[in-house]
Amino acid sequence: MVADKGKKAKLTETGPEEDDTDHIDGELVLSIEKLQEVQDDLEKVNEEASDKVLEVEQKYNEIRRPVYLKRNEIINTIPDFWLTAFLSHPALSDLLSDEDQKIFKYLNSLDVEDFKDVKSGYAIRFNFNENPYFEDTKLTKTFTFFDDGTTKIVGTTIKWKEGMGVANGVNHEKKGNKRPPAEESFFSWFSETEQKDIAEFQDEVAEIIKEDLWPNPLKYFNNEADEEESEGDGEENGDDDDNDGEDDTEGDS
């Protein structure tokens, strides 16, 4: 009988601990459920914010459009504007062969335009005067983004004039997403078209033109980017010189 009492006493001692554990677990589950509800509310707010941002972006795209057109009219009066801007750009300059630079002298305007629904894609257009290289006066590359995560890329099939196609990279093969070296041609970029998974998709040339060159090409035409970089280097060197001077003075004393 004594042994039975001891056993019952032990069972009685562990009972409250199990009750506390169950209570804590229940509170934890409840807290996590409440936290998930708050996160769901935040997701709804974020989605609404994204929609509002897109609405504003689309509105201002319409406002920017005539300003861009006016800018293009002025640029068209400046000889070799786009050629100079490309050659001054640290990334784009490496893509132009010597022959490409001759072709760019016939480029009278560049245009980047988002689709009306900005999240669905955009187009990049190069408008040329009549030239001895190809029949086209407009070369376009469009990027269309679909809800299923794919991107459709369409580029102008350039109609090269006799003897000009091979010299400008039309028959060169491209492996993967790697851009062709400058000795081939920048214009082979227009033929790099296919359906791609957006998770792996990245057209560096398009992104640089759209996000960097297009917003302010005058910066590169005037070589302001190089000047800013040089000024930054100069300031760093100046700070080092000042520090060196202070060290020398301390050493002399």
Image (tube, rainbow, N blue to C red):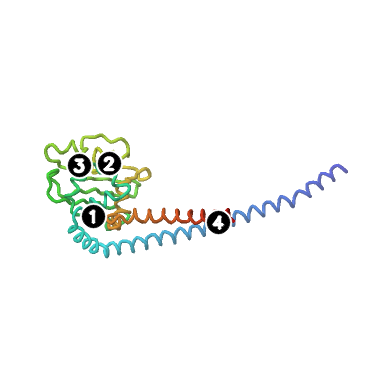
Residue 151 numbered mark, or none: none
1 vs 2, front mark: 1
CA–CA distance in space, label 2 to label 3: 26 Å
3 vs 1, front mark: 3
The answer to whether 45 appears left or right of 6 in the picture is left
Q: Is residue 214 above or below residue 181?
A: below
In the rendered image, which residue does mark 1 sit on? 111
On the image, the x and y values in percent for residue 170 come to 20, 37
3 vs 4, front mark: 4
4 vs 2, front mark: 4
Choose the circle earlier in sequence order: 2 or 3: 3
Q: Secondary structure at mark 1?
A: strand
Which residue is at a point 43% across and 59% down the rendered structure image? 46
Choose the circle earlier in sequence order: 1 or 2: 1
Choose the circle earlier in sequence order: 4 or 2: 2
In the rendered image, which residue does mark 2 sit on? 194
Mark 2 nearby-residue class (10 Å; few <14, some 14–19, many ≥20): few
Can the viewer see residue 117 in this picture? Answer: no
Q: Secondary structure at mark 3?
A: helix
The amino acid type, in three-letter code, at marker 3 is: Glu
| Image quadrant where one finds the N terminus | top right
In the rendered image, which residue does mark 3 sit on? 99
Choose the circle earlier in sequence order: 4 or 1: 1
CA–CA distance in space, label 1 to label 2: 22 Å
| Image quadrant where one finds the C terminus | bottom right
On the image, the x and y values in percent for residue 161 come to 12, 40
CA–CA distance in space, label 4 to label 1: 58 Å
The answer to whether 30 appears left or right of 187 in the picture is right
In the rendered image, which residue does mark 4 sit on? 249
The amino acid type, in three-letter code, at marker 4 is: Thr
